[in-house]
Amino acid sequence: MNGLNRRDFLRWSAAGAALAAGRRLAKAAEGRRPNVVVILTDDQRWDAMSCAGHPFLKTPNIDRIAREGVRFANAFVTTSLCSPSRASLLSGRYAHSHGVRDNFTDYPADLPGYPRRLHDIGYETAYIGKWHMGEQDDRQRPGFDYWMSHKGQGNYFDNEFNVNGERQVIKGYYTHVVTDHAVAWLKRPHPKPFLLIMGHKAPHGGPIVPEPRYEHVFDGVPIQRPPTAADYGPGKPEWLRLRVPTWHGIEGPLYGLKDFGKFVRYYHATLVSVEDSVGRVLAALEETGQLDDTIIVYTSDNGFFLGEHGCVDKRAMYEESIRIPLLVRWPGLVRGPMVVDRMVLSIDLAPSLLDLCGAAPLEGIHGRSWKPLLGGDARGWRTSWHYAYNYETEFPYTPNIRGVRTEEWKYVHYPHGDGGPDRYKAELYCLKTDPHETRNLVDDPAAAEKLKELQAELARLLRQTGADPDIMPVDEGIKNVLPRY
């Protein structure tokens, strides 16, 4: 015990517990606003947690957030692409409104978001980890008192970080380096309420690299291709088949790995390290008496395909790509376990956190606070929403996508294809009877009325949110797709 005998150790432990309890009472007495910790993973699918029923990935620390708070079982991104999605999480806006339409555009310096709004009302703010907006710029962004990030995607080992303006190579595995600094920051004195955003690299590929102690953790788990792995033929648009031989398709190099089983095992193995990280963050908050005074959010910027419909990566509007984990713990509002089934979106995070913290709402946004849902009030909550992906010249096999999802249906529109060539064939699915999206009903006479209804709803949602109708044509770009190894 580092020189302490058992009696001294117990005395100091009791004193620490009393101090933590005193801090909680003092905060309650002064009506202090809650702290906020947002843990953001990269490309984590909604079901990659044991609390969501994963068959072999065990995540007890992540599950604790759900068990003691709320799990949103139907959380979605409005654009399944890293930078646009991250900008939507911060701003509460669709990509056409915040302007970050690709992975090379930075978050606009003059665009309001929840971190700056909290900073303006007296929060101490920190960003630690992967930012990934403005690919080659690691400079400190407005609204953050403490900054630790890097250029681009970052590496799983030995990154150069910009720490408050000073660049330094920090040795070690990404997840633990970021967690070390986040925990150290949490343990500092914080006379004001604080916001900490932690940006993990895991489980993003390029390639996917688990830390050595977890590299073989799932070697004994048999991995099979999903039942929909070959679902890119008849009934599906041709662009999906063209994508399969590329490095974003299941017949490509799988983000640097040739073996599908290894690819899936490595993807989940990186999340074991994130699970450890979450445990350390919870322990740090508990140790400093701040756990129950802190809104903890666990979420991701995108979903991810693991072979479904012949795909890896994201971008397309199938469920595996657009659904994300969203867990929230704050005993000041809800004591779990609670599961919310209503559809919530990435654009809802900013207004929700500002609402919970008693800050003024952002103007001109598209998201809304899910705080009423936690009290059981779903009156007027959305029953439909629209999805958008904008064509990237670097990835010519995926066209522009616009779609609408309701609680039971999904309509996917490729702006150059409805009623046109099979390359951009539209898609219509009844999610209630076909949750894996294998039966495209767009040409089914029995679904003709539903098709018209959803087409009208998509048009209404686009008008309502001020979406730009000018969508870049991609016919020539996708015509001669070559494998990109």
Image: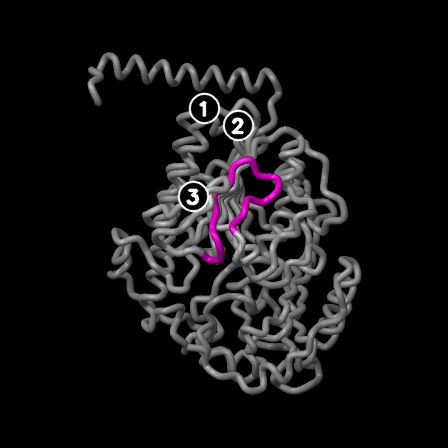
* Crowd around label 1: few <14 · some 14–19 · many ≥20 (10 Å): many
The quadrant where residue 412 appears? bottom right
**Percent x, y of residue 293:** 53, 27
At label 2, the amino acid type is Asp
The quadrant where residue 120 appears? top right
Q: Is 99 or 212 nearer to us in this picture? A: 99
Asked if 40 appears above or below 13 in the picture, the reply is: below
**Label 1, label 2: how many angstroms apart (C-alpha)?**
8 Å
Question: Residue sitting at 47 percent across and 72 percent down?
Answer: 248
Residue 110 drawn in magenta: no
**Percent x, y of residue 473:** 68, 78
Residue 29 visible: yes
| The disc label shown at residue 63, or none | 3
**Percent x, y of residue 183:** 41, 35
* Crowd around label 2: few <14 · some 14–19 · many ≥20 (10 Å): many
Residue hosting label 1: 289
Residue 140 drawn in magenta: yes
Labels 3 and 1: the sequence-earlier one: 3
The magenta region covers 138-153
Question: Residue sitting at 69 percent across and 44 percent down?
Answer: 112
**Percent x, y of residue 457:** 75, 65
At label 3, the amino acid type is Asp
Q: Image check: 250 left or right of 217?
A: right
Q: Are marks 1 and 2 in contact (CB under 8 Å)?
A: yes
Q: Secondary structure at mark 2?
A: helix
Q: Nearer the viewer, mark 3 or mark 2?
A: 2
At label 1, the amino acid type is Gly
